[in-house]
Amino acid sequence: MSMILTDEQQAILNGEKGEVLAKVMKTLVMYGETFGAEKMVPVTSEYNHLVTSFGLGSLKPVYELMDKLINAGAISKQKFSCDPRPLDKNVPSNFIQNLIFKKIMYNSQDFYEGQLNKLGLMEKDAFTCTCYMNEVGNKPKEGDVLSWSESSAVVYANSVLGAKCNRNSGIIDIMGSVVGFVPYFGLLTDEGRKASWIIKVETSKKPEAQLLGSAIGMKVMEDVPYVEGLDKWLGTELDDAACTYLKDFGAATASNGAVGLYHIENLTPEAKKQGKALVKDDANVYVIDDAELEKVKNNYPVIWKNKDAKPKLCFMGCPHMSLQQLKDWTDKVEAGLKASGNKKVVVPTVFTAAPAVLKEFEKTPYAARLKATGVITSYICPLMYMNNPLCGKMPVITSSNKLRTYTTARYYTDDEILVQITKGGSK
């Protein structure tokens, strides 16, 4: 099927604005036609967000492409943020691990960040997977059309903010921003945003966000779920607590499945406005109760060489933690240490958040209190850290289902993590 282009889009494709822009447009047209798109639509958000933030030595074709864009003056029409940096000297690592990080894996980081600055990076430290945090400043408006790729950010923008974006691949995100258009298909369309699953939450207590998201993601895969019963626990307003919950919930649906949009009855924007009109007539039904969540958790594989090993590191914040999460976890860690009689965490622990969030956190009295517990704060991407084969061999624990899915890290609930890092041993 041939896509119908506007005169402006056709002119770009014909090379009237240069050969490089023509190739970018051709790529986007081919991408759209693969998914049945009949047209292109303008990108309307103020900012873009790029998933490719790491300077892997193996990404030479990406650097060559970026150079071609820069040299042709084909820079982004929007300033953009990027996913988290892969390195931070404050995160525990030994000499050999550092050697692999800096000399073998991320040996082009400085060079690549230089390219990003030339292409339109928002600011020097705009590296986070939670770009939509108020402190970061890249928060799309309802109805905005985006050109994003980061799965946890896409699902949050679509679901919680009511923006419109497909789960694109890396580099497609910058291409959409360079030409200012994206193919119109999937989650950009009204039909594509309808739910083909009804999820009935029937738990006896507020379900763990990461577990609930995991269960839904593995069941519906790339489909859109309409979740009933969760408003009982979250309320009907998107306050800070609800948004934080949905951040972690959505990341699990996107990584344990391929969800790009979910609707929460009586809570998320489209569900509030349209209700059951969002649900397709032939929608499947999935009931989630306490037993179902326990079954899901018990089926997670433990791929440590020694399943009884003592954890050597704990990562919290994948996706990055919010300011309120940092404050809440400071209280939790202090209480856990007091109850166990310990002064500092017994497992090296890293809380990750956006640089802008950490900057605000440092202005609060919580920062000194958290530091006194031995917890480290960082802007790093835990997943990029774990991709180091030597780090992957370490027994690392986390409450992130995304990190569990993509690495060797072992999943525990938030309550179990608290026990592990403040007391030691299993809950």
Image: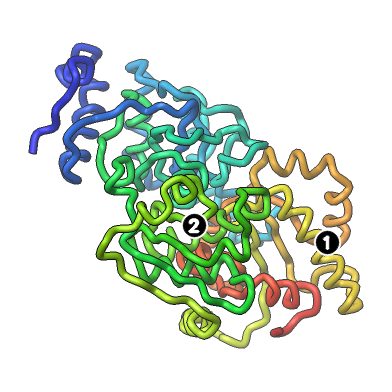
What residue is rendered at 89% in x and 74% in y?
342
What residue is rendered at 39% in x and 74% in y?
286
Q: How many labels does the image show?
A: 2
Q: How far apart are marks 2 and 1 (CA)?
A: 29 Å
Q: Can residue 67 be seen in this view?
A: no
- Residue 155 picture location, percent across and down: 45, 50
Residue found at the far left of this picture = 1
Q: Can residue 354 be seen in this view?
A: yes
Whether tag 2 and tag 1 are in contact, CB under 8 A, the answer is no
Residue 168 against residue 213 in the figure, above or below: above
Instruction: Give the quadrant of the C terminus.
Output: bottom right
Residue 21 against residue 84 in the figure, above or below: above
> Residue 331, which numbered label?
1
Amino acid on which disc 2 is placed: Ile
Residue 69 against residue 159 in the figure, above or below: above
What residue is rendered at 41% in x and 48% in y?
274
- Residue 66 picture location, percent across and down: 37, 29
> Residue 240, which numbered label?
none
Give the mark, 2 or 1, whose residue is nearer the N terminus.
Answer: 2
- Residue 199 picture location, percent across and down: 42, 68
Q: Residue 308 lies in what quarter of the image?
A: bottom right
Give the camera-side residue of 29 and 301: 29
Residue 209 against residue 148 in the figure, above or below: below
Q: Tag 1, which secondary structure?
A: helix
- Taking the image as shown, residue 354 lies to the left or right of residue 156, namely right
What residue is rendered at 62% in x and 54% in y?
242
- Taking the image as shown, residue 335 lies to the left or right of residue 113, namely right
> Residue 264, which numbered label?
2
Give the camera-side residue of 379 and 216: 216
Q: Residue 330 lies in what quarter of the image?
A: bottom right
Amino acid on which disc 1 is placed: Asp
